């Protein structure tokens, strides 16, 4: 193979605009980690994140060359789903407690959070399930059957307890149910039933202290000296950035340690304090462009499975972005959800790149199918 053909093969199938939009977000996270802390601490997070970013891009490009059409086999996906469920179950025996949640495996040289892998597996198995049932999709049973795939990891993660990741799992299921064409009336009935059950628990079963905890969770700023302290400090950091920010390295909330986890959960608040509204809007614009390109790449799918997988990856990213930024603004509870591509940590970063790499692979190896045929199949024509 000559050099020209080699580079043509590399370029083919990769959405380089996604790569272009990813780079400034990663750089924003790295610059923020480097600026907010004393030199030795900043260097620790910065240096480790550089390694994770390099590994993430390696996963992205390697996965884009692997033919993942074998994932369309039901037996393969069910095996992967059950294996990941067992890994989540093993956390209760071998897991390491961090921030009150038993959600990590501590391997000594590295920590691993298996729920990040399960989120990607859930997108795959739901894409497979809905792709084969487009003709009968309005049957209410598909809400319950697909819900069972999400319910297993949801409960296992909720019991750790990791409410944030449990909510991501729920939102992935809900988003894919909505785009699959399931009857909205049936879905509404399910949610009405859930609301009635919750109301009966509220008035008949929950003690007052349990009601207070739920109220604090719904309104994180209700108790700024207790459960709402982190959210309160985050809103101060975001607001103090004003229009143009305080400047790189001048974020007082993060440098003076008022803002907790400025390299991870609250990296957006630390960034907003230094770069202001203008910088924050630029980050949001870049995320929007990434979501758009993910959905655009999904349109190259030859069949429902590829299209639904692309939509699922978009939902995966949107869920993390909305929850993390919502909690940084004090609008949502603090749940420990990382901001994609920007927060410190390798576990979530590797599986974000893995999801994008699989999407590129599906685009690369997608069979040539007439667009009208694909559209008719997706709409159940």
Image (cartoon, helix red, strand yellow):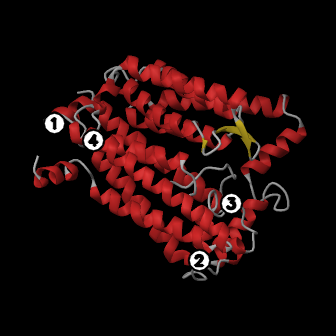
Q: How far apart are labels 4 and 3 at the CA level?
A: 36 Å
- Pair 4/1: label in front: 4
Residue at mark 4: 65
Crowding near pointer 1: few (<14 within 10 Å), some, many (20+)?
few
Mark 4 and mark 2 residues within 8 Å of each other at the beta carbon:
no
Q: Answer yes or no: is residue 174 visible.
A: no
Dot label at residue 274: 2
Where disc 1 sits, the SS reads: helix
Q: Which residue matches tag 3?
A: 261
Closest to the camera, between mark 4 and mark 2, is 4
Q: Is residue 285 above or below residue 361?
A: below
* Left or right: where 199 falls relative to 171: right
Q: First in sequence, mark 1 or 3: give its number.
A: 3
The span from disc 1 to disc 3 (Cα, nearest Å) is 49 Å
Question: Which residue is drawn at the image coordinates 27% and 53% (left, top)?
Answer: 15
Measured from the top left, where is residue 210 in percent x and y? 84, 39
Do the numbered discs 4 and 1 sit on residues whose CB atoms are within 8 Å? Answer: no
From mark 2 to mark 1, how far is it between C-alphas? 49 Å
Q: Is residue 342 above or below residue 199?
A: below
Give the quadrant of the C terminus.
Answer: top left
Of the two numbered discs 2 and 1 on the same chain, state the one appearing first in sequence. Answer: 2
**Which quadrant of the view contains residue 135?**
top left
Task: Work out how far the residue at label 4 is from the one at label 2, CA to CA, in angstroms.
Answer: 39 Å
Instruction: Tell me if I can see residue 85 in this picture.
Output: yes
> Mark 1 sits on what residue?
372
Q: SS class of the residue under badge 4?
A: helix
């Amino acid at each position: 193979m000559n050099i020209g053909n080699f580079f043509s093969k590399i370029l083919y199938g990769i959405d380089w605009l996604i790569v272009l939009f990813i780079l400034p977000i990663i750089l924003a996270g790295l610059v923020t980690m480097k600026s907010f802390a004393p030199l030795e601490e900043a260097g620790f997070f910065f240096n480790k994140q550089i390694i994770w970013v390099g590994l993430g891009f390696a996963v992205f490009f390697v996965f884009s060359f692997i033919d993942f059409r074998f994932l369309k086999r039901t037996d393969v996906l069910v095996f992967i789903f059950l294996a990941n469920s067992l890994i989540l179950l093993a956390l209760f025996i071998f897991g390491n407690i961090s921030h009150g949640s038993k959600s990590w495996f501590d391997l000594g040289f590295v920590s691993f959070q298996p729920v990040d892998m399960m989120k990607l597996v859930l997108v795959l198995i739901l894409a497979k399930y809905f792709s084969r049932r487009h003709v009968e999709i309005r049957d209410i049973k598909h809400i319950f059957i697909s819900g069972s795939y999400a319910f297993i990891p949801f409960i296992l993660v909720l019991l750790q307890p990791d409410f944030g990741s449990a909510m991501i799992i729920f939102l992935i299921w809900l988003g894919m149910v909505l785009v699959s064409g399931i009857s909205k009336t049936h879905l509404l009935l399910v949610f009405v039933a859930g609301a009635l059950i919750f109301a009966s628990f509220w008035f008949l079963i929950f003690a007052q202290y349990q009601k207070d905890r739920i109220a604090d969770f719904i309104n994180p700023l209700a108790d700024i000296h207790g459960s709402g302290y982190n959210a309160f400090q985050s809103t101060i950091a975001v607001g103090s950035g004003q229009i143009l920010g305080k400047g790189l390295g001048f974020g007082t909330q993060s440098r003076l340690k008022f803002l907790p986890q400025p390299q991870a959960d609250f990296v957006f608040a630390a960034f907003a304090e230094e770069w202001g509204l203008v910088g924050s809007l630029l980050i949001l614009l870049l995320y929007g462009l990434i979501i758009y390109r993910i959905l655009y790449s999904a349109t190259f799918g030859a069949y429902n499975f590829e299209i639904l997988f692309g939509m699922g990856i978009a939902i995966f990213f949107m869920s993390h972005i909305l929850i993390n930024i919502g909690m940084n603004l004090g609008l949502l509870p603090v749940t420990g959800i990382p901001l994609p591509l920007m927060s410190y940590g390798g576990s979530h970063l590797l599986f974000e790149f893995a999801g994008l790499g699989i999407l590129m692979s599906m685009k690369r190896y997608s069979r040539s199918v007439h667009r009208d045929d694909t559209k008719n199949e997706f709409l159940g024509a």
